[in-house]
Image (cartoon, rainbow, N blue to C red):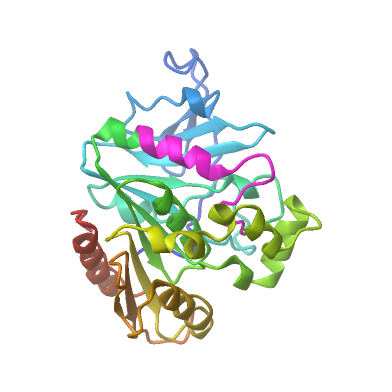
Amino acid sequence: MPELVPESQEDLATSRVPEKPNPITGLPDGYNAHFDVPVVNHRTIGRLRLAQQRFAENRVQMPGGKEFCFLSRLTTSDTLVVTFHGANMASKNQAYPRYERARTFMNTRSSFACIADPTIQDTDLLLAWYLGDQKNDPMNFVDIAVSRAMKKIGASHVIFVGGSGGGYAALRAALRTPNGHAFLESPRLFLETAAQRSMRLYLREYWRGHTVEDLKKLDAERFDAFRSQIADAPAGKVYYLQGLYDPTFLWSEYRVAKSLAGLEAPMGISPSGAVRFELFDSQEQKHGPPAFDTFKKHWRQANDFFGTAVKI
């Protein structure tokens, strides 16, 4: 089942340093005990090298001391799948970096990359929507990593996957990427309606004295992605799956997005063909992903809508 609830990742930072540095990066590799893969360290995003990798965790130094991290399995494929995580859980106390949906796609033959949000590294933030700070926008790093991963595997398409807070990043990445598509599960698409505590903590950490409205005016692509770009999005761009019994997100996100896309019916494809809106039933009134059989059904429909063929 696709995870919105984070996986247990104890010993994620366990390292095992070899005697000699990696001949490609010039830096020593480490080891991720949780996923049983090497950790390949890179000096800068410009020097990211994926050519001889199959399955590894990559860590890239960022200005300011943070790391851009992603776990990837890169094999020949026409489509790359890229996942973004939502809010961390304080009860889990998971250290950075953390990855969601890794197990889901590890159990398939898909080429994939799970990306951690460096915005939350070395902070008390549980959610930051991959927005970064005043100096660094993580999406610039995502752009390069995805481009190089696609080149390595020979992909012509990429599906960005995100639920809840990760949905904002998935949408934004898709809108920035030619032949990029977004598969969204009950996403947060409008930052002004984000949980007040999470947004307050983010603004206090990185944009003290600013409001969300200030940031939307400062950089609409970054802080108001759907509203600022959906009118120009090409057909087959976004598959929006929303829980029917998730009243807050149904009202504050799905309803608004559907109106902005020009769709009057409860479900269907927007007049431009850019967004397909779908609702799913559940046994409980809650925010979260659908049952796995429902997920598989919509994943198939989404791939038909995108013109891709990634099997689950």
Q: Nearer the viewer, residue 120 or 205?
A: 205
Q: Give the quadrant of the N terminus.
A: bottom left
Residue 147 drawn in magenta: yes
151 within the magenta span:
no
Please report the residue visible at 41 percent of the width from the left and 24 percent of the height from the top.
49
Image quadrant in which the C terminus is located: bottom left
Q: Position of residue 262 (x, y in %)?
A: 38, 76
65 lies above or below 195: above
Q: Is residue 111 left or right of residue 98?
A: left
Residue 137: tell me if it is visible: yes
x and y, in percent, of residue 85 in the image:
49, 56
Q: Residue at x 55, y 36 (%)?
A: 14
Q: Please state which of residues 210 and 119 is positioned toward the viewer in this rendering.
A: 210
- Count the marks: 0
Residue 66 image point, x, y percent: 64, 37
Q: Give the residue furthest to the right.
A: 209
The answer to whether 220 is drawn above or below residue 52 in the figure is below
Left/right placement of residue 2 relative to residue 10 reads: left
- Residue at image position (53%, 31%) is 60
Look at the image and tell me whether residue 11 can be seen: no
- The stretch of residues the image draws in magenta is 126-148
Image coords of residue 57 (percent x, y): 44, 36
Q: Quadrant of residue 223?
A: bottom right
Asked if residue 153 is positioned above or below residue 190 in the image, the reply reads: above
Camera-nearest residue between 248 and 123: 248
